[in-house]
Amino acid sequence: MAKVKAPLIRFLITFIAGVITGALIGASLLCVFLSYKIDLFYEKIATLENTIRDKDAKLQNLEKAVNSKNFVLKSIETVLITEENTVDEIDKIDIEQVIKEKFLSLIGNEVRNLDADIIMMIIDNRIIRLNDKEFFLQVEKLMLSEKLKLWVKVDLID
Amino acid sequence: MSGFAATLINNFLIAFGVVIGASVFAGIGALITDHPPLKTMLDLAGSIKIWAMAVALGDTFSSFAVIEKGLFQGEFRSIIKQAISVLTAIFGANMGYFFIKLIHRCGELWQK
């Protein structure tokens, strides 16, 4: 019996070791080869979620101002200026979201009632903390019409 | 192969392996925990470099002892040897980091 059992145990141990090794190698290769594509999907999801959130907020604020024929703020756009390879795409999407959230309450307000200097000061020279990283924001340019467009320089603080 | 050359090769490969292994398995972890894998790998590879170097050098106190001996007893050869060991470990860790960056770059190239 012992003679029969010993090879069986040997086979089982080797088989299990092989399965674990294969699983680890397979998972590693999968991670290496597919990680970029999966990251792209994450970026796409984050962008789409942001768009939905923006549209919702915009709709809500525009519903309030629907009957007025005044010149109201309708949308917000941010252009992030970064040095190459310092801020990755997912962080950029998150930063854009944080910036837009600060200005969402302005949508639907009359443009002549908005003060560009105060709008600028909301995010100028600010440090924001995201995903265990700190980013320094500086507003380079601001354009205020029906659309509020901000050019923001983003520096990663080490 | 001389003992010193063997140590250098070991240091390089250990530092390289620590960065690659940690990043790849962090990537698998990120997949399980619903985070972007490549971003996690890059972030981790960048932050783990210094630890990979420490792991490669292993017994860091002996390194300090060698440096102290070199400085105060005039054994400059051992200081130079130690410096080369440290540099090899740094090189290994950075090569690991660049390998992870290379995966990102390859992804970009194939996506276009």
Image (cartoon, rainbow, N blue to C red):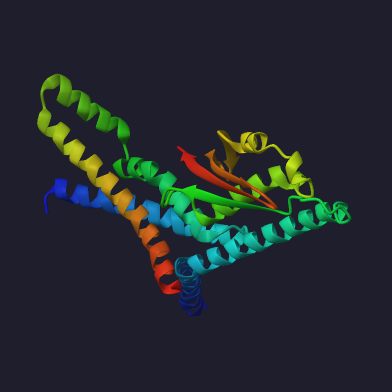
Residue located farthest toward the top when viewing the structure as drawn: B72
Residue B26 visible in the current orientation = no
Place of residue A153 in the rendered image (x, y in percent of width and height, measured from the top left): 50, 43
**Residue at image location 49% in from the left, 48% down from the top:** A81
Place of residue A77 in the rendered image (x, y in percent of width and height, measured from the top left): 63, 53
Foreground of the two, B10 or B38:
B38
Residue located farthest toward the right when viewing the structure as drawn: A67
Foreground of the two, A46 or A132:
A46
- In the depicted structure, whether residue B57 falls above or below residue A149: above
Residue A150 visible in the current orientation = yes
- In the depicted structure, whether residue B32 falls above or below residue A131: below
Q: Which part of the image, by quadrant, shows the C terminus of chain B? A: bottom left
* Horizontal arrangement in the rendering, residue A20 relative to residue B1 (left or right): right
Q: Which part of the image, by quadrant, shows the N terminus of chain B? A: bottom left
**Residue at image location 54% in from the left, 65% down from the top:** A40
Place of residue A5 in the rendered image (x, y in percent of width and height, measured from the top left): 51, 76
Place of residue A94 in the rendered image (x, y in percent of width and height, measured from the top left): 61, 50
**Residue at image location 33% in from the left, 49% down from the top:** B93
Residue B33 location, quadrant: bottom right
Foreground of the two, A53 or A39:
A53
**Residue at image location 45% in from the left, 66% down from the top:** A32
